[in-house]
Amino acid sequence: MTLAIIADSHIPERETDIPDSFRERIADAEHTIHAGDFETAATLDEVRDLATALTAVHGNADPADMGLPSVAELTIDGVTFVVTHGTLNPVEAAVYGDDGFVMSGEDWNRAIADTARARTRSWDGDGIVGIGGHSHRVEDTVYEGVRVLNPGSVTGADPADRATMLTVESDEGEIDVTLHEA
C-alpha cells in the first residue's frame, strides 16, 4: 500500500498552494496522512478532495473548530502509524512551564516516540511508526525502538527551505520511506 505523508501546509498565511507534483502523489496514494497545520478549513477540504483516504490531526496553527483530533492512529499491513502534530508534550510543559513546545531534535523525537508508544501501549516500539510535523524539518530515524517520521512542510513554509513530503510503501509489516522535494 502507498501512503502519502504531509504536514505544515500553512495555506494561506505563509504559502499559497501545494506543488503540482505533490498533488499528484497525494491523489495517487491509497491513503494520505497530514500531521497538522492546514491553517484553514478550506485547506483541509482541498487535501480531503485530493486524497483517496485521509487521516489528519490538529496542529497549533489550525482553528479549534476544525474537528481534528490531536492524535490519530491507523494500522496498515501490520504497521501502526500514530500521528500527532508534535507541539505538545505535557511532561515538558509541567516540568519546564514552556507551553510544551518541542523544537530541538532529540526532544521532538522523544515526544513523537513517547506519544506513539503510549497510544499503542507497546513499549518496545515494534511495528510502530510515529509521525509528526511542526518543525518543518524532514526526519526519518529510529528513537528508542520507534520509527519516527517528519515529512517537513508540503509547501516549503518558513522555516523550511524547500517543499517536502514522504511516501511510504507498506507490505506485510515492512515499510520503505522515500523523500520527495519540490
Image (tube, rainbow, N blue to C red):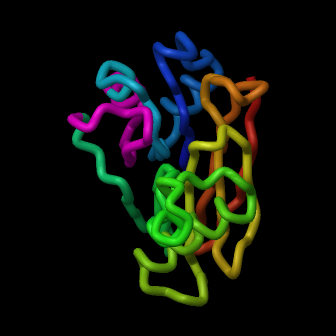
Image position of 82 (left or right of 163): left
- Residue 1 visible in this rendered orientation of the protein: no
The quadrant of the rendering that contains the C terminus is: top right
- Residue 94 visible in this rendered orientation of the protein: yes
Q: Nearer the viewer, residue 36 or 135?
A: 135
What segment carries the magenta color? 45-65
Q: Residue 134 at x, y = what percent?
A: 57, 43
Q: Nearer the viewer, residue 38 or 92?
A: 92
Image position of 82 (left or right of 64): right
* 142 to 167, vertically: above or below: below
Q: Residue 31 at x, y = what percent?
A: 45, 46
The residue located at (74%, 35%) in the rendering is 180
Image position of 163 (left or right of 121): right
The residue located at (71%, 73%) in the rendering is 143
Q: Residue 91 at x, y = what percent?
A: 49, 72
Let me know if residue 56 is in the magenta part: yes
Q: Residue 80 at x, y = what percent?
A: 48, 70
